[in-house]
Amino acid sequence: MKKTLAILLTLALLLGLTGSVAVAEDDWITLRVECYDREITGLDVTDCWQLHYAQEHFGDPNKIKLEFVSYARWTEGTLLDQALNGSNAPDLCMTYDGGLVQQCIDQEGIWQLDDLLNTYGSNLKAFLGEELLSYGQSDHDGDGVKEQWYLPARRISRANVGNFIREDWLKALNMEKPTDIESFTNYLRAAKDAKLAGDNTMPFSFGIYAPDPLYNVRRFTDAFVDFTQVTKEDWFAYARNPEMLPGAKEGFRWLNTLYHEGLLPDTFALADNDKANDTALIMGYNGFFSQQPDQPWRTDKNYQIELEKNVEGGHWVTVNPFKNESLGGKTLHDMYAPAGLSIIIPLTANEQTAIAAMKYLDWMAIPENMFAMQNGIEGINYEGLNDDGIPYGVKSADDVPNENKMHAGDICFISNGLCYFDDAKNNAALALPFKGYEEDVKASYADSLTDAWTQISFTTTIEAETDYGSTVKSKQGEFLAAVVSCDPAEFDKVYDDGIQDILNSGAQQMIDEFRKAYNDGNYRGVFPGDL
Amino acid sequence: MTTGVIQKKTPKPNCFTRDWRLYLMLVLPIAFYLIFCYKPMIGIIVGFEKYNKFKGMWGSEWVGLENFRFTMGMSDFSTALINTLWLNFLGLVAGFPVPIILAIMLNEMRSIRVKKVSQTLLYLPHFLSWIIIGGMVLQIFAPTSGIINALLLRWGWIDKSIPFLTDGPHWQFTYTLVGVWQGMGWGTILYLSAITGINMELFEAAKIDGANKMQQIWHVTLPGIRSTIVVLLILSVGQMMNISFDRPQVLGNAQVRKFCDVLSTFVYRTGIENHKYERATAVGLFQSLVGLIMITGANIVAKKLGEDGIW
């Protein structure tokens, strides 16, 4: 008896290792759709309200069972790559990782979308439009005709830069809002001298964004670039190396000066700095910070409301002091391309599933469906609709019951941002969710779009960027830490050595390839000299 | 001599027929090693390919040593290699003796309760994730705001922050110190059990011969655990090329990048982030080969010195 039992148990264990065999159901299709998980407390993205809504209105009538597969937002590229490697990726995927998408095209692992789009995607095609769709087209087989490989999501707002200053500090210092770098620096110095937040006063909130260290810094250093010495070709050649543009050196010297005057934190390079920076902003220690144009009022990290709790009258307002003299005082702001994240259908999805995926995207592009998927239910997710039909009184995630919690952009991913199918309405809607701060938000977006240049992208694979891109970024982090914190007497040497180091680590190859791509006409984006 | 009946020689029972239950029990562990340790090793061929994730390792183009040439030719590779060896060397020199000393000290404790409590407290850091330790390190060692610098500045003992985390050599010191602190309690376990195995009579004999505490430790305890020390030392030397990802990643920062960039972070950056698994594999294989050479070398040296070695 014991013997038999032992054999049975062992066999059972061995069988368990081989895995179970799936049983096919009737004629229903299962469509696995990727979605991001931003770890919003109480929201289970794989069982969220939007999934049930889409299942009811799209899935059930079409005999398609929708399943959401969640990837953590901040590591999505790596996670999707792993899933693709394991032939286990969702049937409908999205990513911000352009390199990964390009690799998928080069390695021929995703559906070519032209036929699917033409047959099943008429609404989607209208929503995205020809210009936007062209971002996802490239000539892979070399026959001179571009094929559609991915679908770029439509960016509703392209504003990227938000610079904010403390209005209450300006009042306390009896100063006007700074309009150029000199008056801005004077404001920082005066705030430090007046110890507006006691011993904790740290006028300039500054940290290193490790994934792309100069991405948020070029908005300052571009103001120092001497555009009389920059050709359009150079601008595109140095697409990922703003630190090498003529004149940018003075921008870094300016940051070095701020550092040595104690105007920016000496912990700026430490890994955990983000959290410390958030706390400082909320506690009211800082007089300036630079992030996204709606950053102070976002529902997940509301610097403005939190600041008011800690500092009476604390008030963040937009500021626009980074004038470039060589461009006649233009205040440059980089701006997103019209294309947002990239949507792909891996070849692991069979034809029927690929059709279902395209039908789902097309369903999403119909205005009433998008409205529901992005805004939720009146009375639960928002208070009501204004005259334009735009929701007002949008609730923050904490005030919505778990079963109704949602993240608009991550599920309705053909649109990066809330879309009401009308540019004026879309713009008006940007400020509307932030009750009581509508004017502040509008002013911030207006500043952000002043003298805005579209970020650079290339329409061919830049091999050198795939090979060296991450190394160059990592070197740029080291460079930034070094030039900002070094002894001012050694600045020139540290800067020059740092540039050489970056060039040697692969930037030179990237610059050469970017230059070639520019000369071949394979580029997108705007040269500030053309503004 | 037996009686007239010729005894038929019974065939020696086949060990499989006799002990088949034991062998059956062995099936699972062997399956585990085959599936999780040996089968994945086939994947090293990816390191010799221009890997196409959709075609898999059998369908990708063979490029020979190209990936090795590329990764080792990168400007960061030598820095990462040297840092890996240097940080591991520092960790070995500073960290290896500590658990031995601690184990002997614990062993000499007379109160069982104090001994148990201190042992538990010493183990604790081993169970903390590096993310948590990273936060603690920042609280303690950060410039100006960290506890140490804040106190020293306030007392006027220093007028400039000590750059524990922002200057290369200082950072390596902090890295090593934190590593020793985190691992020392856990490291005592093997030594303590080895000490327990020493024959008590040896201690008594030493005592009768008039040996004091220090002499007992030197002449009885240490020789008693010598073979354990040697085995662990050989194993540590074999690990010289391996370095965890989380510890340098969490403790490191852009300001000390030249000192904290190691092979694991290098692999992550050039292999995983860029979606170039073939390069990650190439570096991994290189690490394993060097590790194998080192551990073999250490074992040979140990045997030459009259120790048992590990095989």
Image (cartoon, rainbow, N blue to C red):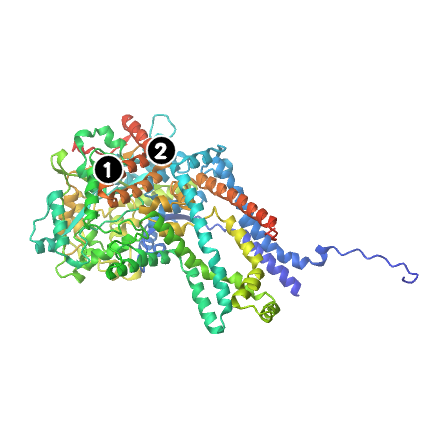
Q: Residue at left 18%, top 62%?
A: A310
Residue located at (13% from left, 54% from top): A193
Q: Quadrant of the N terminus of chain A?
A: bottom right
Of all residues shown, which one is farthest toward the front? B210
From the viewer's perspective, is A322 left or right of B23?
left
Task: Give percent across and percent down for residue B185.
Answer: 46, 62
Residue B94 is drawn in which quadrant?
bottom left
- Between residue A285 and residue A453, name the one nearer to us: A285
**In which chain is the residue bearing label 1?**
A
Residue A492 is labelled as: 1
Please state the horizontal and vertical placement of residue B245, each as a whole percent of the image.
41, 49
**Looking at the image, which is closer to me, B101 or A101?**
B101
Tell me the residue that label 2 is attached to.
A464
Q: Foreground residue, B101 or B293?
A: B101
- Give the amino acid type for the residue marked by disc 2 in the picture: Ala
- Mark 2–mark 1 Cα distance, whole angstroms, equals 28 Å
* Eye-nearest disc, 2 or 1: 1
Q: Which sits in the foreground, B294 or A2?
A: B294
**Which numbered disc, 2 or 1, marks the residue that appears first in the sequence?**
2
Task: Find residue B63 and report its horizontal and vertical position in percent.
Answer: 48, 32
Q: Residue at x 20, y 41 (%)?
A: A253
Amino acid at the residue labelled 1? Asp
Per the image, label 1 sits on a secondary structure element best described as: helix
User: Where is residue A239 drawn, in percent x and y?
Assistant: 27, 35
Quadrant containing the C terminus of chain A in the rendered view: top left
